[in-house]
Amino acid sequence: MDPVRLSSTDRLLAVADQALRALTSTPQAARPKPVASRPGAPLDDAERRHAGALMRVNHVGEVCAQALYSAQALATADPALRRQFERAAGEENDHLAWTAERLSELGARPSLLNPLWYAGAFGVGLLAARAGDATSLGFLIETERQVERHLEGHLERLPAGDQDSRAIVAQMKDDEASHAMAAEQAGGTRLPAPFRWAMRVAAKVMTTTAHYV
């Protein structure tokens, strides 16, 4: 069935199903996991723990991305925009799968607060979408720009020998930039400065907490 023609009830059920899959199942990527162009050096225990913490934060970001896109796709009345959100969510699901697999390889666990992060991101995404498509897209642009800067910081902070994590983060960074550009081209408006600052503070709280919990 065409997802654009689903009833409101069907869409709500699809949203619930997506939430359960994001939080409880092993995600399956549509694209192959990025691989390093050259092998990295073996990681010692401290480097492995550090890389695991950083990739846990990135995994949380992808859990939140699933929630945001799900909320925005649910709230928009524009079928073309809904399809755009759903396509982007598919790429973000690749990120979710890649980071989950890398966490396992590093012997690290996902954040224990993932249900809380998902619920919060879904609520924020729904509020942004209710303000109109231009604002919803503007929220998406700012989110992706912040994530892009965050991933750039992780490329600098990951252990030098962890080429496997670096390959994943680099591809994620490129995808986030593409999502922001697509949202700009679709008519997203720049958010007022106070909203952008509040988003940065909220993101800082989330990433700092997810590093440990």
Image (cartoon, rainbow, N blue to C red):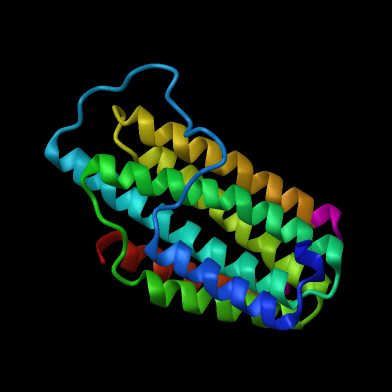
Quarter location, residue 129: bottom right
- Residue at 57% across, 52% down: 92
Quadrant the N terminus occupies: bottom right
Can I make out residue 98 in this image? yes
Q: Which one is nearer the viewer's eye here, 146 or 57?
A: 57
In the image, farthest residue toward the top: 38
Residue 91 magenta-highlighted: no
Percent position of residue 51, x then y: 28, 43
Residue stretch rendered in magenta on the structure: 184-192
Residue 189 magenta-highlighted: yes
Percent position of residue 39, x then y: 33, 18
Q: Which one is nearer the viewer's eye here, 8 or 114?
A: 8
Percent position of residue 71, x then y: 64, 74
Relative vertical location of residue 157 with respect to residue 205 in this rendering, above or below: above
In the image, farthest residue toward the front: 1
Relative vertical location of residue 195 with respect to residue 147 in this rendering, above or below: below
Quarter location, residue 210: bottom left
Magenta stretch mostly in which secondary structure? loop
- Residue at 53% across, 70% down: 17
- Residue at 66% across, 62% down: 142
Can I make out residue 200 in this image? no
